Amino acid sequence: MAAAAAAPQRRRSGGPRGARPAMAGGKCRMKMFKFAVVLFFAILATSTCKWDRCLEGGTHKHRPSPEPDIHECTLYSESSCCYANFTEQLAHSPVIQVSNSYWNRCGILSKSCEDYMKKIECFYRCSPHAAHWINPNNTAGIEFVPLCQNFCDDWYEACKKDSTCIRNWMTDWEWDENGVNQCKNECIPYNKVYANGTDMCQSMWGNSLKVSESYCLCLQMNEKDAVAIKYLTSKSSEESSSVGSSEERACRRKLQKAELLTEEEGVEIEVFEIL
């Protein structure tokens, strides 16, 4: 009897001791789960916030947000790095001055040339994607933004009869005591300053822009950029941006489909939300 009575006591006393490892294991699993969740959101934040930002210029927001009342640069109204009131400077033609930079030092720009200058200004000031090409040595600037060859050629054609006194808008101005740009040299036609569209795109703004070898993985500063941006901002595109790459082929298919929908059905090109 004593032996029989003792057995249940050992079982009862063994119960709690046996439960401790299970409880400890549960706490361990919970901690690991919490760590995994924290790690997941940390990785997610790192991957998303890299592009959910703006350049750090004087007119830029900290992060892009909608600007439904934007006056110009409407391509970026749904997610803009500039405030609507900034675009008032670009809303009326001819544009004389943007911030402290005068556009009329060699006369009023032609409407066609002004339109292209606005496209570049809008991208730099307002695009939520410009920070993808942020200049690591100057966080207010961009570098090597890939433009399509046809965009640069058309820009050159639009401006070649206009005049300028500089080759590089970043470095060639003389700035007076009021911080206003002045010419150092005489005004001559654009086609005397730049040999062609490639030369103009890759010289006018220093190393801010480049002409892409790709037909599709490049920007045209219009609605078609929604297709290109999806691939240009992907890691694989950064690693392989050749004309024959899988990203190039996928981009072309998507662009052709979008153009077909636009032409045949009047459907707007799909705008991708870049996370």
Image: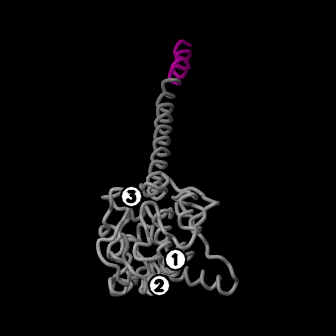
What's under tag 3, amino acid-wise? Ala
Q: CA distance from mark 2 to mark 1?
A: 9 Å
Earlier-in-chain disc, 3 versus 2: 3
Q: Which residue is mark 3?
A: 140
Residue 9 located within the stretch drawn in magenta: yes
Taking the spot 32% from the left edge, 62% from the top edge, the residue there is 175
Could you tell whether 261 is left or right of 230 in the image?
Answer: right
Q: Main secondary structure of the magenta part?
A: helix
Q: Position of residue 260 (x, y in %)?
A: 62, 85
Could you tell whether 159 is left or right of 239 in the image?
Answer: right
Q: Quadrant of residue 268?
A: bottom right
Q: Which residue is mark 2?
A: 158
Earlier-in-chain disc, 3 versus 1: 1
Q: Which residues are magenta?
A: 1-15
Label drawn at residue 115: 1
Say if mark 2 contacts mark 1, CB within 8 Å: yes
What's under tag 2, amino acid-wise? Ala
Q: Nearer the viewer, residue 166 or 132?
A: 166
What's under tag 1, amino acid-wise? Asp
Taking the spot 37% from the left edge, 78% from the top edge, the residue there is 164
Label drawn at residue 159: none
Taking the spot 48% from the left edge, 49% from the top edge, the residue there is 40
